[in-house]
Image (tube, helix red, strand yellow):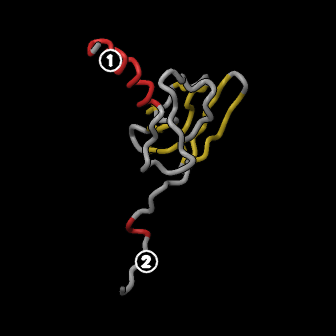
Amino acid sequence: MLRNLLILLLIVQPALAAQLTDPTRPSGIGVAAPSDSGQNAPLRLTLIRLGPQPLAIINGATLKLGGRIGGYQLLALRPGRAVLASEAGQLTLPLVASLHQNSTSQTSGTR
């Protein structure tokens, strides 16, 4: 009896855990399924690093110039945007606004 109960818990537990959500996650931000290859997900540019080794983070994936995601190839990085290309043509992807403000951008004053 105890063995059957343990087996049932092992089977049910992953399904229950998959339904839980992170209470600290900002609303409107989803989590991509692990099997999602990026083909159907809208592309979101969340970070650009310019310089000698430029890179971008798109849908959580780190891409160097020439890297590919969801049928697109990263062609160029510009301040605030990335240029991608696919068989259908070029796509300019704007940088998604940050959820956090930089502490240096706050005005100084007395409290």
Foreground label between 1 and 2: 1
Which picture quadrant has residue 71? Answer: top right
Farthest front residue in view: 1
- What is the quadrant of the C terminus in the image? bottom left
Q: Nearer the viewer, residue 79 or 18?
A: 18
The vertical placement of 71 against 74, above or below, is: above
User: Residue visible at 48% across and 55% down?
Assistant: 99
Q: Nearer the viewer, residue 87 or 5?
A: 5
Find residue 5 and name its label.
1
The vertical placement of 107 against 23, above or below, is: below
Mark 2, secondary structure of its residue: loop
- What is the quadrant of the N terminus in the image? top left
The residue type indicated by label 2 comes to Thr
Question: Which of marks 2 and 1 precedes in the sequence?
Answer: 1
User: Residue visible at 39% across and 17% down?
Assistant: 11
Residue annotated with mark 2: 107
